[in-house]
Image (cartoon, helix red, strand yellow):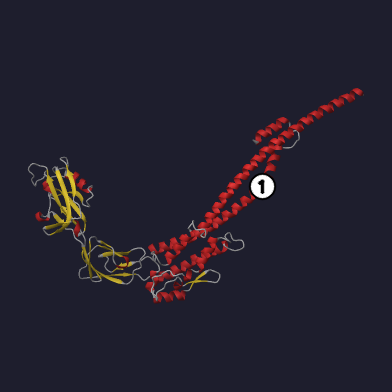
Amino acid sequence: MDSSVSSIVSRLGAGSGVDMVQLANDLAEVRYAPQIERLQSRNEALQSQISAASLLRNQITQLASALGDRIRNGDLSPAPTIGNPSVATPSVLAGTSPSGTYSLEVSQLASGQTLALDTFTGSNDLVGEGTLTLRFGEVNGASFTPDADRPAVEIAVTTDDTLATLANKINASGSDVTAYVANGASGAQLVLKGAEGAANGFVLEAASTAPTPTASPGDLTHLAWGPASDTGQLRQGAQDAQFALDTIAMTSASNIVTDLPEGLTLELSGTNSGAPTTISFADRTGQISGVMGDFVAALNDITSELQANAAALGGELGNDPGARALKRALSSLSSVIVMPNAASDEPSTLGDLGLSVNRDGSFRLDNDRLQETLTASPQGAAAMFTTGLYGVFATIDDLARSTSASGDPGSLAGSVARYTSQIERNDEKLAKFLEQQDVLRERMTRQFVAADRNVSQSNSTLSFIQSQIAIWNAQDN
């Protein structure tokens, strides 16, 4: 628009000698400059508040995340050890803090049933048409006790099926039985392996469609198996693991044993009948001292940032409800009960771990108090460093979640949401002012161009009159 108007003014001769387009633009900007500058300045302040609140919220969240990682995977993670590592590999569930010692004696490992069925010439030999049925239960010597609650698995075998394709069908049946063809010195054999545990034994029933079924290669009956007719096909029976924990006899269908005391999990790998081994847990009192030192330093970083941003004079969050809520939470942190289930003689607060608040709101570590707790109740102190419902991590994680609750107007996230909403409203007002400014600029440009054209015409008329007067005066002389 401005370039076209300038062209018009130029063609008209710019009779006034004034740049009417620039004049209209300057006047329009002056008219709305205070409102636009005020909104832009307010948005800049709001952006600074958003940055300050987001920084504090992120610091709390990062502290909770780092503390959780250190408890789960760092020097505070539960570290069980075993005297004879060939017997088992111990571990503990997240959120637990086991202590003490356990004796472990393994007399039998869990295993799955393994069958090596009668031989064929090769893996491409036809096995015969019919239905092969897997039934599950317990195989005990020559007897089989079916599991009435576990359905049998039927596999349809066609005239084109070979030993290799039958193995594939078994693997695809969803029966938890795996199969493959072993090409041994005596020929090809179908090998079947079941899941661990005595209840996962199985038999094979073959219903051949041959007019006169025979237990020979090429007829499905050749693959039938039951314990009563076993002639060496059973290479490994299905059995449970048997072990004693602190002399208490236990069994497990799997070599991965869970549901043990204090979240202990065992991966059994060998036997040690008559020679029990010991499971114990590392003393973490030294690591707790280090973690508390790092924890206090991290809290002071947050406190320093909070005090700078929430200062009554000059602070970006001087009157922010989220910042005030964080101040209150930090000021009472040392006295908050983080272990409500602790016994009366066990540590239950961060103050018991040496966390102390100075008068200026900063933190310090009372090493004497910490060492007193570690000496009197090392297990109680260790129990405070888990990722469970209670403890140091749960307390800081709850604080991080509360500061990040955008639906709470009294949280830092709520403040960010409120400031963001204000910026959006200001942007809408700013857009309206800019639109009104454009309208005013266009209207004044039209008016000024028209006025300039009138001036040009008046100047032309004046010049004509002056010329005529000059001619008349010359004639008179």
When the figure is inspected, residue 244 is found, relative to residue 42, above or below; the finding is below
Residue indicated by mark 1: 33
Residue 120 seen in the figure: no
Residue 15 vertical placement versus 423 (above, below): above
Q: Position of residue 247 (x, y in %)?
A: 23, 71
Q: Is residue 127 left or right of residue 251?
A: left
Specify the farthest residue to the top: 475
Locate the C terminus and report the quarter of the image it occupies: top right
Q: Quadrant of the N terminus?
A: top right
SS type, badge 1: helix
Horizontal and vertical percent position of residue 174: 23, 49
Tell me, yes or no, if residue 384 can be seen here: yes
> Residue flagged by tag 1: what amino acid is it?
Ala
In the rendered image, which quarter is residue 6 located in? Answer: top right
Locate residue 272: give its quadrant.
bottom left
68 to 221, vertically: above or below: below
The spot of residue 318 in percent (x, y) is 58, 61
Q: Residues within 10 Å of mark 1 (few under 14, many from 20)?
A: some
Left-right relation of 46 to 134: right
Residue at the image point whose x is 57% and y is 55% from the top = 48
Residue 138 % position (x, y): 16, 58
